Image (cartoon, rainbow, N blue to C red):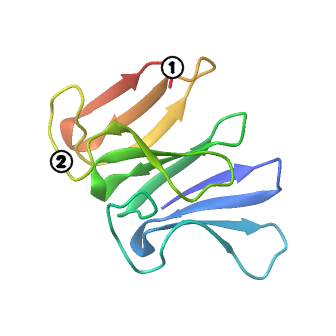
Amino acid sequence: MAVHFDSTTNSLVIANTGVHTIVRWAIGATVWTLVAGYPGFSGSLSTMLNSPACVIFDSLGNMYVADTGNYRIQFFSAGQRNGTTIAGVTGVQGNAANLLNNPRSIALDNQLNLYVADTSNNRIQMFSQL
């Protein structure tokens, strides 16, 4: 599970790994809002996640998810629930340059280069200017 603080909405965005979802919990709220995935259901469709481990946002509000169980990084345009695979190949693990094996953590730099902690390959992968 990972937590990202979104200062623009004063909320926590949570990669809820065991439930296969990304949820938003506004500070002071009593309930969460579903952002991506389907609670309790893993899958590899563009609207589904499988054990998401990390969530981050860029300055435009676009969301990036380390979708660990699908061996991919998913990109969600701001406010959208359909994701696009931008790194890795859905459902295919490996150690080739275009493949991931249990991506657990992600980061963006100021040029929108994506860094992926490719855990089972014991490496950090960089994907240029996404």
- Disc 2/disc 1 C-alpha distance (Å): 23 Å
Q: Nearer the viewer, residue 52 or 80?
A: 80
Position of residue 55 relative to residue 51, above or below, is above
Where is residue 43, by image quadrant?
bottom left
The residue labelled by disc 2 is: 92
Residue type (three-letter) at the residue carrying disc 2: Val
Label 2 Cα crowd, 10 Å radius (few <14 / some 14-19 / many 20+): few
Q: Which of pointers 2 and 1 lies earlier in the amino acid sequence?
A: 2
Instruction: State the image coordinates of residue 112 (x, y, percent, origin top left).
Output: 57, 23
The residue labelled by disc 1 is: 129
Position of residue 126 relative to residue 35, above or below, is above
Q: Residue at x 59, y 17 (%)?
A: 111
Q: Residue at x 15, y 33 (%)?
A: 95
Where is residue 29, by image quadrant?
bottom right
Instruction: State the image coordinates of residue 60 (x, y, percent, origin top left).
Output: 72, 36
Where is residue 30, by image quadrant?
bottom right
Q: Element at badge 1? A: loop
Disc on res. 66: none
Residue type (three-letter) at the residue carrying disc 1: Gln
